[in-house]
Image (cartoon, rainbow, N blue to C red):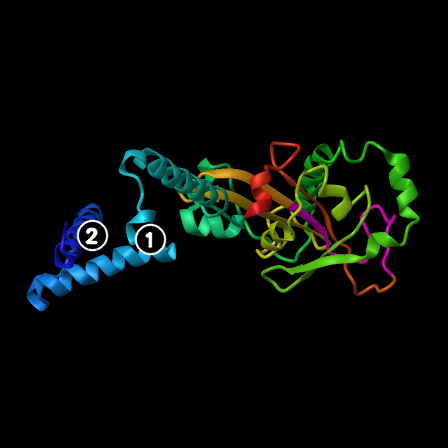
Amino acid sequence: MFDSRSIEWTIGSFAGSLIAQYAADHDVLLMPVKSMMGESMKAKVASFALLGSVVLGVAPAYADAPDPSDQSSVVSAGASAADSDAAASAEGGQLLLTTDEQYVQTFGAAEAAQQGITYEAVTEADSPAESAVADDTDKVIAEADSAAAADTGAAADEAASSHWSVVKFVGHDADGRYIPTRQGNRAFGWVHFSGPHNIHSSKVIKVAVSEHPERGSTKTRKLYGAVLYDRLGIILARVKVVAQYHWETADHKYKLADHDDKIGVITAYCQGVNKCPDALNRV
């Protein structure tokens, strides 16, 4: 038969070995308990701790420790989380949107030209030479919008609607001009370009029109540009925005009652493609 002291010591030793194993697995430094209390007290404390875990149904501290044999699953989970973070960063944090004007100022005219970006601000004057450039610009716009303007019957029907003049949002250029974007219809405005050209973010338009009007602008027709690029300066999309800075459209079909008001954005598109990349709407 074992006496009570022997049983206490045996239980204490067993508990101590488990605690020591847990400490070794988790790099935990144990205090030299023996130096602070007698051997008998050490054994009793250990036995009570272990016995209490069993009687009360409380899992010992080492019960939740990861199984060393299953470390591959832990590493895999960590890698998946890191991949997700990297993907999110690449999607939303590594692309930038700015005006043509700012891009040229940041990277220089030579580098911008290599990326297909040229910028030259224009004055308020509407000279014959500028009108000729504007005509060329209108040809490019017409080509970009040809698909959207195919259904002329639907556009004519919408011309009778009063909803085209509703302002969705407003921007201001570097000279302080008020440039609204109106609901529009299939002929111009938000309805005209958002779907066909895949521009669904108001930020794209607001950024583009925040510069000084570009070459090709006239007194009543303003041309603006923006670029989507990565941190290396590589351009992924070149946006052009055309605005009518007048109370009626150039074809005189749409007019505002207030002659001090402005029609605003006629169209917006990405040069070289019919639809802008989805990433443009996420910056």
Q: Which residue is mark 2?
A: 15
248 in magenta: yes
Residue 89 sits in quarter:
top left
Which residue is most to the left?
Answer: 35
Q: Is residue 86 left or right of residue 273?
A: left
In this view, the residue in front, 7 or 81, is 7
User: Which is the main secondary structure of the residues drawn in magenta?
Assistant: loop
* Vertical relation: 5 (above or below) 229: below
Residue 276 on image: x %, y %: 62, 37
Query: SS class of the residue under badge 1?
Result: helix
Question: Callout 1: 10 Å neighbours few (<14), some, many (20+)?
Answer: few
Q: Amino acid at mark 2?
A: Ala
Question: Callout 2: 10 Å neighbours few (<14), some, many (20+)?
Answer: many
Evaluate if marks 1 and 2 touch, with contact meaning CB atoms under 8 Å apart: no
In this view, the residue in front, 46 or 229, is 46
Which residue is most to the front?
Answer: 1
Question: Which residue is depicted at the point 53% across and 47% down?
Answer: 119
110 in magenta: no
In this view, the residue in front, 26 or 75, is 26
Residue 101 on image: x %, y %: 51, 51
Residue 225 on image: x %, y %: 59, 47
Question: Which residue is depicted at the point 82% across and 31% down?
Answer: 150
Q: Which residue is mark 1?
A: 54
In this view, the residue in front, 184 or 252, is 184
| Magenta residues (range) | 241-256
Q: Amino acid at mark 1?
A: Val
Question: Which residue is depicted at the point 13% across and 56% down?
Answer: 3
* Disc 1/disc 2 C-alpha distance (Å): 12 Å
Earlier in the chain: of badge 1 and badge 2, it is: 2
Residue 176 on image: x %, y %: 63, 65
Which residue is most to the bottom?
Answer: 36
